[in-house]
Amino acid sequence: MKNYIQLKSLNTFSIDVCAKHVVTVHNECALLKFWKKADNKGQPVLILGDGSNILFLENYIGTILLNRIKGIFITENKMTWRIHVGAGEKWHELVTYTINKNIPGLENLAYIPGYVGAAPIQNIGAYGVELSQICEYVDVIDLYNEKKIRFFHAECNFQYRDSIFRNCLKKYAIVSVGLKLNKKWKPVLDYHELIHLNKNRVTPRQVFNFINIIRRKKLPDPMSVGNAGSFFKNPVVDINIARCLFQIYPNMPYYSQKDGKIKLLAGWLIERCHLKGCVFGEAAIYSKQSLVLINRRKIATGTEIAALALFIYNQVADKFNVYLQPEVRLIGNYGEISPKKLFI
């Protein structure tokens, strides 16, 4: 589109779409200034970090603000470290920084792509640890009244891959996150890929290094193959539904939840539908991890990726009567599109 700006390098799926304006902001004043400028013109605004959890389905007619608000500030007492982090810091670089400073607690969340500002939106998690377990507060700007607000942990309404912020992205801009890490470190080794590690002898750096190795083996490098990591959430189902499934599939892996529900593994469900490696035009399911959808040669459209996701959704629903939900946010001309419009 004439005078529009290419976004292919600004989303890890490498979808070749455009936006009317793209502005990089390095502080809260600039973020608010450019948001107001676009809003006064009646243009939609999308605040973006690494573009590692979105799928552009078409060109974006508004302004994209790249949040690059930096800063890592650490305080401590006898019991805890507190880390105040700018939303524009890269998440994995933050994890690496803390490990190098001998501050454990983030190692299970190593090698997760994206920026810190996106972490609370979907309550990022991996290998038995979620952001909600270590997040003390989230600072936002209310874009309409220009006030800065601090949401403390209880107000964030953290749930599995969800939070209060997920549905408030047009109202709030996340500018910083506060983390609280306990100095009495205990390794979290519950996931089957980690259980062989000796909990009495393993160090935070060993856990960090091991998870880096695992994730590099399982996930394709976005520099080579377009992807956004896990496309679907692991479905959480009622215990009665799970019992019915266990009768048919006694070896089905699962994780019991504190509320009595059961978390199933979306990758396992997809594999049992014999979809691993499935190709849909230029889109495909990654051969090493069924949860990952890929833009094979970086020439797939967003609608091709979405069509493959819908095919997977229907196959899993038909076989297991379980309905997958995307972890990735779908972006159309005017902004985010509800998954319900695609996955019916």
Image: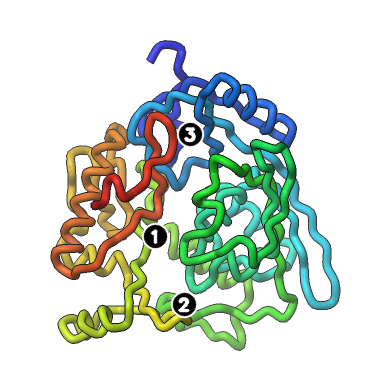
Disc 1 packing (10 Å; few <14; some 14–19; many ≥20): few
Against 72, residue 68 (above or below) is above
Cα–Cα span, label 1 and label 3: 24 Å
Where disc 2 sits, the SS reads loop
Pointer 2: what residue? 194
Image quadrant assignment for residue 319: bottom left
- Residue 176 located left or right of residue 288: right
Disc 2 packing (10 Å; few <14; some 14–19; many ≥20): some
Pointer 3: what residue? 10
Chosen colour scheme: rainbow
Write the residue at 59% across / 42% down. Answer: 171
- Residue 317 located left or right of residue 104: left
Q: Which is more N-terminal, label 2 or label 3?
A: 3
Q: Amino acid at mark 1?
A: Lys
Pointer 1: what residue? 217
In this view, the residue in front, 173 or 226, is 173
Q: Is residue 224 visible?
A: no
Q: Nearer the viewer, mark 3 or mark 2?
A: 3
Q: Amino acid at mark 2?
A: Leu
